[in-house]
């Protein structure tokens, strides 16, 4: 039988060159990756005389270079990749062998044809990193491959010679000089775009954990230097952030950002499959708070050595990102994919939904997170041959079975990306109920959120594939009767995993948690009994209150409606203040047992005192409030609220000692003055009670409230009394924590100032009066 062989047309050059490398940007990326694969620590991209007929692109690296054998057996061997068959570095010396492995960014054997996309001529100069190295030179006219497609590819000659010298000051490395560039290929806008794309080409932490040398890319376009200076001056005049200059200038080192270093506080989840492919580790943090970390058996049999990092972009995070980077997050990109440190296109590009994240989000509005609220990266390390880049360099990855285990987000899919995304959504949507979009949200201070977190963690830990767990132990401090079942299920799972994994420390933690749950259950029972007693006491208050209807914010409550209001306040005390006091007491006891610093102990004592103050205050005014006392805020006329409180409520507490001394309180309110604003009634009353009680302690007989409207957004209240006043030596201390000159706690004025500051206002004191003192409060919308 006769053997026949394929012939290869010279037209192959176009198929694997200009037609496969889809644009100039991709061509530059391929050549940068080749420099990285050559062991370079720096590659410089120079666009010389780029707007003239003599334009030249110079790509220079300090890699290991090539000798004649390399050129003939590798560079000129079309579609052959020594990187792919693991023979690229068989000649490296012992010193290189002891360095950590640097995996290759490209392994197709076609990247060299990127030069064809950029220009007609290629002049290659290379010096091998070896003793007595020669200066090898190859010159290619790509047009010759287009003249006659009947000619065989291997018959088109390439000029090769050895140079005696070169104008480039390099000891080793490769220089690519590309000329014959099409006019109009490049302008300032395309260079800005190239720089932005190059900044995302390399993973931010590339090589920092695997080699001692970073990989640096420098862009040099002399023709744009003056325009850069103009842009820098404009940015400085506007006091633009550092990121602005990087995204609006061309020349200089290309830098990528590391999200963690921007100081953006948001929710982050990281999922990693180890290099052996045996285990998956997942950790979740919310701003600065650790939530949980789990280790489980890997159910994705085709995956190994991959990591997924996702950040939920809440509104504050987007604002900070834009301010520090000088670009909107949506313009920067979303979910990038990197293999061995180099980005795979088009993943992460604005408007790209190759991974189906946005398509999924549309199917579950307000339940699923879309790309507008997501930024992150998928890192593929090692060989991972089934997670390979498509030959067409903007087509992403080849759709293998391994690919679908990694990133498939379609309905009924089961991929590591989808699992990670769902766990992030479980926290952001179900635990915080999108509360993470509120800049002031803190999971530690959200009791309901912490209760939901117990359920979430309990459900996660039900999974029998878990190997080890760690979680924020503070969640045990929010035990509630209705959450008792979840907490106990959580405890059972912790103990189970501790026994199965033979983790002694985890078992110790489980026993501590068991004791804590038991302790909290008893405390809850005690608090319930105490609240029952308070309910009985509350009923007896009815006989001391007048029964009179009014249409004001504070009324003399109708006797018939009083029971309903008392039940309301009892509910508030039980569901909120008593629970907080119980939790803070437990924390205080634990802190004392652990010899915590004095500042921490005082802080907990302060929180207990403040909650106690709320209980006392609520019990005083609840039966006179003509609004729902369980609401956090009301929107009303603040001036009217204060005036009615001191008239209809404070002065009529017949069971309070202050009333037995006939303290006279009046107010001077200019006609027609109103100040409608949202506020928390209980907090405003705590302020008033503290100031009026202080006046009584200071032996005042008269207190006057004077109102002044400074502007539409600012209202001033001056509270003046005729007591003994405040000595000059104490004026600067009266708002300090625990400062007192009486037998009081020293917390009243401290709490008052704290509340006013949180409302956006200020409080000051004027002791330059003949008698008494004046407190000046500024309320601001």
Image (cartoon, rainbow, N blue to C red):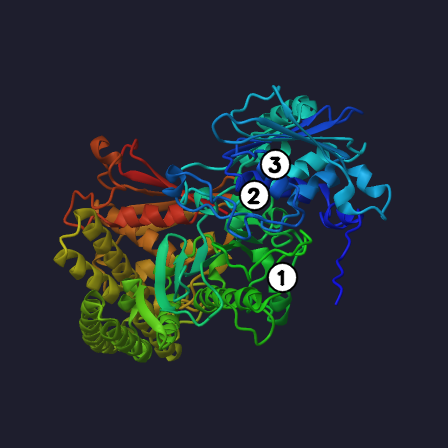
Against 763, is 556 above or below?
A: below
**Rendered residue at 66%/42% (across/down):** 76
Residue 83 visible here: yes
Count neighbours of disc 1 (C-alpha within 10 A) and say few if under 14, some if 14 to 19, many if 20 or more.
some
Checking the image for residue 157, the label placed there is: none
Crowdedness of circle 2 by 10 Å Cα count: few (<14), some, many (20+)? some
Q: Which residue is mark 2?
A: 322
440 left or right of 477 in image: right
Q: Give the vertical position of 613 relative to 701 (above or below).
A: below
Dot 3: element: helix
Q: Nearer the viewer, mark 3 or mark 1?
A: 1
Image disc number at residue 247: 3
Q: Which residue is mark 1?
A: 398
Residue 395 on image: x %, y %: 67, 56
Q: Quadrant of residue 18?
A: top right
Q: Disc 2 vs disc 3: which is toward the camera?
A: 3
Above or below for 570 versus 160:
below
Location of the N terminus by quadrant is bottom right
Q: Earlier in the sequence, mark 3 or mark 1?
A: 3
Between disc 1 and disc 2, the foreground one is: 1
């Amino acid at each position: 039988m006769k053997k026949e062989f394929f012939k290869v047309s010279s037209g192959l050059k176009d198929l694997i060159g200009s037609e496969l490398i889809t644009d100039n940007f991709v061509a530059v990326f391929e050549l940068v990756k080749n420099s990285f694969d050559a062991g370079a620590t720096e590659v410089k991209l120079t666009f010389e005389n780029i707007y003239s007929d003599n334009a030249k692109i110079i790509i220079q690296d300090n890699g290991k270079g090539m000798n004649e054998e390399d050129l003939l057996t590798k560079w000129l061997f079309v579609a052959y990749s020594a990187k792919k068959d693991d023979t690229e570095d068989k000649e490296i010396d012992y010193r290189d062998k002891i360095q950590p492995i640097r995996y290759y960014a490209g392994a197709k054997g076609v990247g060299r044809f990127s030069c064809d996309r950029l220009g007609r001529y290629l002049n290659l100069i290379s010096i091998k990193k070896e003793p007595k190295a020669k200066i090898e030179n190859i010159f290619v006219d790509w047009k010759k491959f287009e003249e006659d497609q009947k000619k065989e590819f291997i018959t088109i000659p390439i000029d090769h010679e050895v140079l005696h010298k070169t104008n480039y000051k390099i000891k080793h490395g490769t220089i690519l000089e590309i000329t014959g560039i099409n006019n109009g290929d490049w302008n300032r806008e395309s260079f800005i775009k190239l720089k932005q794309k190059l900044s995302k080409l390399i993973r931010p932490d590339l090589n920092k954990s695997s080699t001692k040398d970073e990989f640096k890319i420098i862009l040099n376009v002399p023709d744009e230097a003056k325009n850069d200076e103009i842009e820098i001056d404009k940015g400085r005049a506007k006091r633009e952030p550092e990121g602005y200059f990087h995204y609006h200038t061309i020349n200089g080192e290309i830098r990528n950002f590391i999200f963690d270093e921007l100081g953006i506080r948001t929710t982050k989840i990281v999922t990693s499959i180890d290099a052996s492919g045996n285990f998956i580790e997942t950790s979740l943090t919310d701003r600065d708070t650790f939530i949980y970390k789990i280790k489980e058996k890997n159910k994705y049999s085709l995956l190994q050595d991959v990591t997924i990092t996702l950040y939920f972009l809440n509104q504050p995070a987007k604002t900070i990102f834009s301010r520090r980077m000088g670009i909107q997050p949506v313009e920067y990109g979303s979910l990038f994919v990197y293999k061995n440190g180099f980005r795979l296109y088009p993943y992460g590009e604005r408007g790209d939904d190759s991974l189906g994240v946005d398509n999924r989000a549309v199917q579950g509005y307000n339940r699923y997170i879309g790309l507008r609220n997501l930024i992150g990266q998928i890192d593929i390390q090692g060989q991972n041959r089934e997670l390979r880049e498509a030959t067409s360099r903007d087509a992403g990855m080849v759709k293998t079975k391994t690919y679908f285990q990694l990133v498939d987000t379609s309905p009924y899919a089961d991929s590591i990306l989808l699992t990670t995304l769902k766990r992030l959504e479980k926290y952001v949507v179900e635990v915080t109920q999108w509360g993470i979009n509120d800049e002031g949200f803190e999971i530690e201070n959200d009791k309901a959120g912490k209760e939901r977190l117990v359920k979430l963690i309990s459900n996660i830990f039900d999974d029998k594939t878990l190997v080890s767990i760690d979680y924020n132990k503070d969640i045990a401090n929010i035990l509630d009767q209705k959450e008792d079942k979840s907490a106990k299920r959580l405890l059972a799972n912790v103990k189970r995993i501790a026994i199965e994994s033979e983790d002694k420390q985890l078992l110790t933690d489980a026993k501590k948690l068991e004791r804590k749950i038991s302790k909290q259950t008893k405390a809850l029972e005690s608090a319930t009994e105490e609240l029952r007693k308070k309910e009985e006491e509350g009923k007896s208050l009815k006989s001391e209150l007048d029964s009179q209807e009014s249409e004001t914010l504070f009324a003399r409550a109708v006797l018939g409606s009083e029971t309903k209001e008392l039940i309301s306040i009892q509910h508030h005390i039980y569901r909120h203040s008593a629970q907080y006091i119980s939790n803070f007491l437990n924390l205080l006891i634990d802190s004392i047992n652990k010899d915590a610093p004095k500042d921490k102990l005082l802080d907990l004592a302060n929180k207990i005192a403040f909650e106690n103050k709320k209980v006392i205050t609520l019990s005083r005014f609840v039966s006179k409030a003509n609004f729902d006392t369980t609401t956090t805020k009301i929107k009303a006329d603040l001036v009217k609220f204060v005036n009615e409180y001191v008239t209809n409520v404070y002065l009529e507490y017949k069971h309070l000692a202050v009333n037995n001394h006939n303290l006279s309180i009046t107010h001077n309110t200019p006609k027609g003055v109103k100040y409608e604003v949202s506020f928390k009634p209980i907090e405003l009353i705590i302020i008033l009670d503290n100031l009026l009680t202080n006046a009584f302690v200071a032996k005042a007989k008269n207190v006057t409230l004077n109102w002044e409207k400074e502007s539409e957004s600012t209202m001033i209240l001056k509270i003046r009394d005729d007591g003994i006043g405040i000595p000059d030596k104490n004026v600067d201390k009266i708002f300090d924590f625990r400062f007192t000159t009486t037998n009081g706690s020293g917390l009243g004025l401290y709490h008052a100032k704290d509340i006013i500051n949180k409302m956006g206002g200020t409080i000051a004191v004027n002791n330059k009066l003949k008698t008494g003192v004046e407190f000046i409060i500024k309320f601001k919308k």
